[in-house]
Image (cartoon, coloured by chain):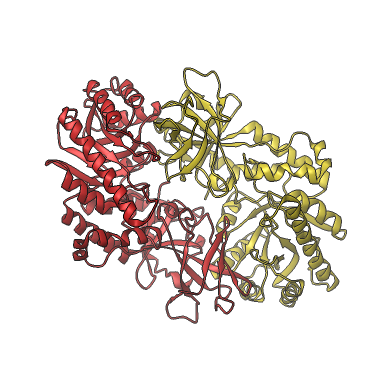
Chain colours: A red, B yellow
């Protein structure tokens, strides 16, 4: 399937957020119905993307990459939206990152030719699926991670007999104590790299990878220092692999940089790494950004990297969930029609941002100080409000999110809206 | 669409958990492929339901309802699986409960004729959708909640002109201070009930509803006492409504009872309520139960209700998620290929239950004491293990869940397995 095919697919009444009277309808028609969020044309809750903010973020990242001479393989797990993958590739993304073979297949179905599986590939069925995809399409450029001898052995067992016609490309993962995957010492890393080299031509070491995004304990300066030290560790691994000639032919890839510290990855890897190395960051969240967790993290970017001020206004939150006030059961409490099924809550609870009363307000009002989400059930939000908060039953509220990944995966359909809240398109996700 | 139609639908490679080489295939064929979870036939992670446990729970609930003379309208939001709705209705369920109009439409698409929307219905589009469905199908028996005069007014505005041909049936919601929706005092409740009566025949008061499931603070005995007092409050509201003749014709419905305290609802409402009242519990989780949160809650059931021991062995956990060990990066740590995208984490983190090494183990081994999930990222589980834990890269681990609702909604496809881990069917969800 290609994007045109996706736009032709039919949405039926089982798709959450679609006006039932309109279904079945084609995805590509959603933006042409003249719907407006504030006019009650959509059932709530709904998730929306503000296209102006998305476009702004897209342009900002292009300029950031020009400034830093880094490449990006945005993490597709964030959105799992082929329409957004296509936008990112059109913006010049080097490839798309995924976390699972299932996610790889979605990206492949929509013609993504370069994929970084930023994960160990260990299941025999999963390895065989990748091998088959490589065999089927000689131009498919695929990378996965290794961090153990066992892991290399499992890849080689299948790669050696799958008839891929070229090596299975791997990136050596460096990790840190108490962290996630990845070799904790350069000695361990080198042992894995040597095993890869010994198994050539079935596998090929193409670079070094790490994920610094979990180094978030302690005050900001301490976090930055830990991230910098970790990035230096990845460079050290790469230098040692290069010194032992463990890399296969082709440019060496050095990749790190999630959505919180991608500036550090882009600049520090670039400055530290030997010439001829491709630095690839992998932020998945820059495109929609968010209203709290990444907003706070990325707010520090220009402190670490003052030159980034030249890029103009920073990333803007593009993702919102809208719901109704369904009850004002106590003076200090409002309950809204949005719950764990509709919005992420893993980093912080959603942030009440706007209030709109149909028939009264010409436009949504800022809701600063008017309420705080203090709890979510599966299908309800508990909002603590001042006793005189003006919210009434049937009013619309909008919420910003923390950590876009866990809101995207609540929706198969996310509307794109313009600045007047007209629905101008729809994004389909594949979780 | 009916269930036969659902079984004929095609699953493509974008469906998480489906072996890509097998796709596209029909849902109804999944159980006939001879797949076995332990033989590596499925890509991991996958979610599975143990059919024997599901059937056991189904029989247990039938006996429980016979014992208590209560009815059940299981909350469909838990599974959003029409195949499981059909099983519950075949078991004698009085109806299906839903939380949103979107969920109602899914149930309606599969022929569910009696639906309790256990929520306020406030959006004009949502009210119109319900009215249209009532107009279209004279045998559709629908109930929703009211807890405010504004809420009644919004329903009446549309019900009065929608040509439904019968009243829109409502249940008056009672709530508790600090809780979710629902009238906090019987005076407030009566005012709402009178407004419903005044708006007849467009709306009709058919009963009283409450949700006690959030009364979980304090030690168990205190919780039980709070729940009992709340149930008594619902009965008081019902008695006062009856005394003022605010109920419409037909049996009065008294409904409460989520998955933690349904025994209290079934017995206390039944004993306290006047004759001729239908007591309806709404547990959504009894069918799969879980390995921690509801396991612990329901373990108290036989203490509160010793006669329930006569029902034989209690509810069994039926839902598991399986993943690979992808890394043993440190002696005390294993990382598995399962994350927030795959399993719920809102009540407790998933519980490591079994370990299986292909080629070594004849059957999964109990993993008691071998590891504890201490964190989840979007696509990874961090497991703290004893330094000598035997887990190796490529081993399979199974995890039990806390709160089935937030694991069901991570999957569009959940396998049914027998006791030898053969895949004997598949359940499709609609979130």
Decide: is B27 above or below A358.
above
Image quadrant where residue A383 sits? bottom right
- What residue appears at the point 34 percent right and 28 percent down from the top-left corner? A148
Q: Is residue B425 left or right of residue B186?
A: left
Picture quarter containing residue B337?
Answer: top left
Q: Position of residue B82 (x, y in %)?
A: 59, 45
Q: Residue furthest right?
A: B275
Q: Is residue B296 visible?
A: yes
Q: Please state if B110 lies on the left or on the right of A359 as rendered.
A: right
- Which residue, as the protein is rendered here, is positioned at the far left? A275
Give above or below for B81 relative to A319: above
Residue B258 position within the rendered picture, expressed as x and y whole percent measured from the top left: 69, 52
Residue B248, how many percent across, how many down?
Answer: 78, 68
- Residue at horizontal 25%, vertical 39%? A234
Give the answer, above or below, for where A132 lies relative to A321: above
Q: How many marks?
A: 0
Left or right of residue A332, residue A240 in this image: left
Determine which quarter of the picture holds residue A232. Answer: top left
Residue A4 can be seen, yes or no: no
**Residue A391: horizontal and vertical position, in percent?**
55, 76
Apparent side of residue B341 relative to residue B202 in the rendered image (left or right): left
Residue at figure coordinates x 33%, y 22% from the top left: A153
Residue placed most toward the observer, B9 or A241: A241
């Amino acid at each position: 399937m290609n994007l045109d095919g996706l736009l032709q697919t039919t949405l039926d009444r089982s798709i959450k957020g679609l006006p039932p009277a309109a279904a079945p309808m084609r995805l590509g028609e959603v933006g042409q119905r003249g719907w407006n969020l504030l006019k009650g044309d959509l059932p709530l809750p709904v998730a929306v993307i503000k296209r102006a903010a998305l476009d702004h973020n897209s342009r900002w990242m292009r300029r950031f990459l020009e400034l830093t001479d880094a490449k990006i393989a945005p993490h597709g797990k964030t959105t799992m939206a082929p329409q957004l993958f296509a936008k990112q590739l059109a913006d010049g993304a080097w490839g798309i990152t995924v976390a699972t073979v299932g996610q790889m297949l979605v990206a492949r179905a929509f013609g993504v030719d370069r994929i970084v599986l930023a994960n160990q590939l260990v299941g025999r069925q999963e390895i065989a699926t990748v091998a088959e995809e490589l065999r089927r399409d000689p131009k498919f450029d695929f990378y996965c991670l290794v961090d153990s001898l066992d892991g290399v052995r499992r890849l080689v067992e299948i790669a050696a007999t799958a008839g891929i016609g070229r090596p299975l490309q791997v990136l050596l993962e460096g990790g840190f104590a108490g962290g996630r995957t990845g070799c904790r010492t350069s000695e361990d890393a080198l042992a894995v790299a040597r095993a890869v080299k010994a198994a050539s031509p079935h596998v090929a070491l193409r670079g070094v990878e790490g994920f610094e995004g979990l180094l978030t304990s302690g005050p900001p300066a301490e976090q930055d220092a830990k991230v910098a030290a970790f990035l230096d560790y990845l460079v050290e691994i790469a230098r040692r692999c290069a010194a032992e000639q463990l890399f296969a032919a082709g440019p060496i890839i050095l990749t790190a940089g999630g959505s919180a510290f991608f500036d550090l990855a882009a600049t520090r890897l670039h400055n530290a790494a030997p010439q001829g190395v491709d630095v690839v960051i992998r932020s998945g969240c820059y495109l929609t950004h968010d209203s709290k967790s990444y907003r706070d993290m990325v707010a520090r970017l220009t402190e670490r990297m003052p030159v980034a001020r030249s890029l103009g206004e920073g990333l803007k939150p593009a993702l919102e969930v809208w719901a109704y006030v369904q009850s004002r059961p106590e003076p200090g409490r409002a309950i809204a029609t949005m719950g764990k099924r509709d919005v992420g809550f893993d980093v912080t609870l959603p942030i009440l941002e706007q209030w709109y009363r149909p028939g009264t307000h010409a436009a949504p009002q800022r809701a600063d100080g008017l309420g705080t989400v203090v709890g979510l059930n599966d299908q309800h939000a508990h909002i603590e409000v001042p006793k005189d908060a003006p919210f009434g039953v049937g009013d619309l509220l909008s919420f910003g999110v923390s950590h876009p990944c866990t809101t995207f995966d609540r929706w198969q359909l996310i509307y794109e809206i313009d600045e007047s809240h007209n629905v101008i398109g729809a994004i389909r996700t594949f979780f």
